[in-house]
């Protein structure tokens, strides 16, 4: 009898769970070169990500990569949040209206 009650309870919880939204890729770009790369994608749920990176000081002891990009997503509150960033020899530097500033 306990098994039946537990089974019915789990079945009820499964039916009450919200359906999962299928997310599809609606745009996807990519270009990889010896001295850098670029990619971007957008999904049907409103998420986007674009990024490009390039090698600096190629062939030297100071060779490094610098990356610039942006990503955005729709949060649970329905608002779109966007982060623009740079990542280079100075570290990861994100900027966004919703991010705290030191």
Image: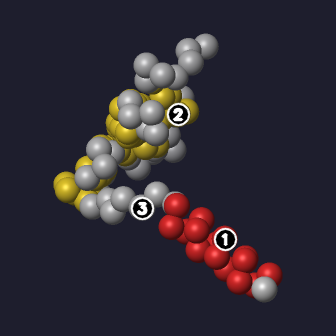
Residue position marked by numbered label 1 in the rendering: 9
Q: Residue at x 33, y 45 (%)?
A: 47
List x then y, in percent, for residue 27: 19, 54
Residue sitting nearer the eye, 24 or 96: 24
SS of the residue at dot 2?
A: strand
Query: Which dot marks residue 20?
Result: 3
How far separated are the C-alphas under marks 1 and 2?
47 Å
Residue drawn at (80%, 81%) of the image = 2
Color theme of the render: secondary structure
Q: Nearer the viewer, mark 1 or mark 2?
A: 1
Nearer to us: label 1 or label 3: 1
Label 3 – label 2 distance at C-alpha: 33 Å
Mark 1, Cα crowd under 10 Å, few <14 / some 14-19 / many 20+, is: few
Whether residue 40 is visible? no
Residue 74 left/right relative to 98: left
Kindly identify which residue carries mark 2. 92
In the rendered view, does 89 fall on the left or right side of 27? right
Callout 3: SS? loop
1 left or right of 96 in image: right
Whether residue 95 is visible to the viewer of this picture, yes or no, is yes
Residue 84 in which image quadrant:
top left
Residue 47 versus residue 102: which sits nearer the camera? 47
Q: Say what secondary structure mark 1 lies in.
A: helix
Outermost residue to the top = 102
């Amino acid at each position: 009898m306990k098994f039946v009650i537990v089974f019915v309870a789990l079945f009820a919880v499964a039916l009450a769970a919200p359906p999962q939204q299928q997310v599809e890729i609606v745009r996807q770009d990519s270009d990889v070169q010896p001295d850098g790369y670029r990619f971007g994608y957008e999904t049907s749920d409103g998420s986007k990500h674009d990024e490009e990176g390039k090698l600096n000081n190629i062939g030297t002891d100071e060779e490094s990569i610098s990356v610039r990009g942006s990503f955005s997503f729709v949060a649970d509150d329905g608002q779109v949040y966007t982060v623009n960033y740079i990542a280079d020899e100075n570290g990861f530097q994100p900027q966004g209206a919703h991010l705290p500033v030191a």
